[in-house]
Image (cartoon, helix red, strand yellow):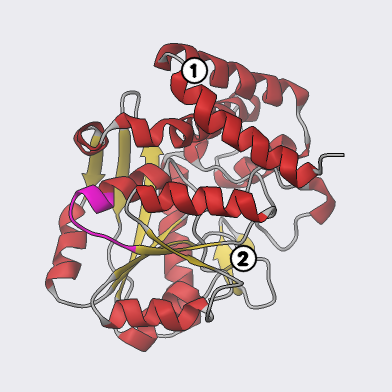
Amino acid sequence: MVSAGRLTDLAYALGWRVVRLLPEPLAAALFRAGADLAWHRAGRGVRRLRANLARVVPAGTDLDSLTRAAMRSYARYWLEVFRLTDLGLERIVRRMRLLDEQTLRDAHAQGRGVVIALPHMGNWEQAGAWLVASGTPFTTVAERLRPESLFERFVAFRTALGMEVIPLTGGESPPYGLLAARLRAGGTLCLLADRDLSRSGVPVRFFGATATMPGGPAALALETGAVLLPVTLWFDVDGWSGRIHPPVPHSDVATMTQTLADAFAEGISAHPADWHMLQRVWRDDVPSVSAPVSVSAPASASGT
């Protein structure tokens, strides 16, 4: 009997092979249809997404339409993941529009390390490929998925895009020291940082309620003197957009993590449909509503 983990790995392997062979318009139509079907079925992940979105948009917003748009955005993310290595660097670079890019370039010009912290918005895989293609290699952290073959598949995918991937667990040494070493050498880290329900999560005020976010980005910046930059991403019709928010002033982990949360909230408020959060975020949420709908995030500061 084939295990559930093995079936999941086979499904992703099939996605990477078959989706790449389909004409792009057909593949896009199929993924939109899949998103609409998931929205109509309103499983636990979709219900959690709707509840999360209800916290971040004004009262009176049409949550049904917004949730459907968010599911389509999430489907677009996965469609692009499966096809990203075939898009070509020229297209990835040409169709990327980054606001306040000079903030990033100025941080690198200082000769210090840079920690880029992101929420689960837009296509962070594409943004990583763009960053490498524009001359900034970086290191990220990946949670160790099960089965191991699935984890290795995602590591190989990100490595092919030019990323250095360090496992969150099960590596030769804990990731924190390796990440700090990269920063001290003037390197760049990219870490997803808008959700951490572990015991080490830092409490923040996020859209008027208490959430927990990883303290790793702030702690690493403080220890190494690196620049901490919040970045938010969203989709355009024919490409991708993002914003480099102002650097987070060095103070303490709690204050700096709150500043990250505020920057994330600003970006999410502007583009709520491109925030792909189908899991629990706030402490007062009912845990049973949520269920994992996707594989683990490709980069996380959790545990660092």
Sequence order check: which comes first, mark 1 or mark 2? Answer: 1
Q: In this figure, which residue is indicated by the disc labeled 2?
A: 196
Q: Secondary structure at mark 2?
A: loop
Q: Is residue 264 above or below residue 239?
A: below
Q: Position of residue 21 (x, y in %)?
A: 45, 19
Q: Position of residue 44 (x, y in %)?
A: 78, 39
Residue 137's place in the image compared with 216, above or below, is above
Name the residue: 59% across, 23% down: 65
Residue at 55% from the left image edge and 53% from the top image edge: 152
Task: Please name the residue shown 40% across and 76% down the image.
Answer: 179
The local secondary structure at tag 1 comes to helix
Q: Position of residue 300 (x, y in %)?
A: 52, 63
Q: How many marks?
A: 2
Residue drawn at x 65%, y 26% as measured from the top left: 64
Question: Mark 1 or mark 2: which is in front?
Answer: 1
The kind of residue tagged 1 is Ala
Q: Up-down: is 148 above or below 21?
A: below
Front residue of this view, candidates 210 and 85: 85
Q: Position of residue 254 (x, y in %)?
A: 50, 79
> Horizontally, is 15 left or right of 25 in the view?
right
Residue type of the residue flagged with mark 2: Asp
Work out which residue is located at the far front of the displayed protein and give it.
1
Q: With respect to residue 282, does 55 lie above or below?
A: above
Range of residues picked out in magenta: 131-138
- Return the residue nearer the eye: 76 or 259: 76
Front one among 251 and 109: 109
For label 1, the residue is 27
Label of residue 250 in the image: none
Q: Main secondary structure of the magenta part?
A: loop
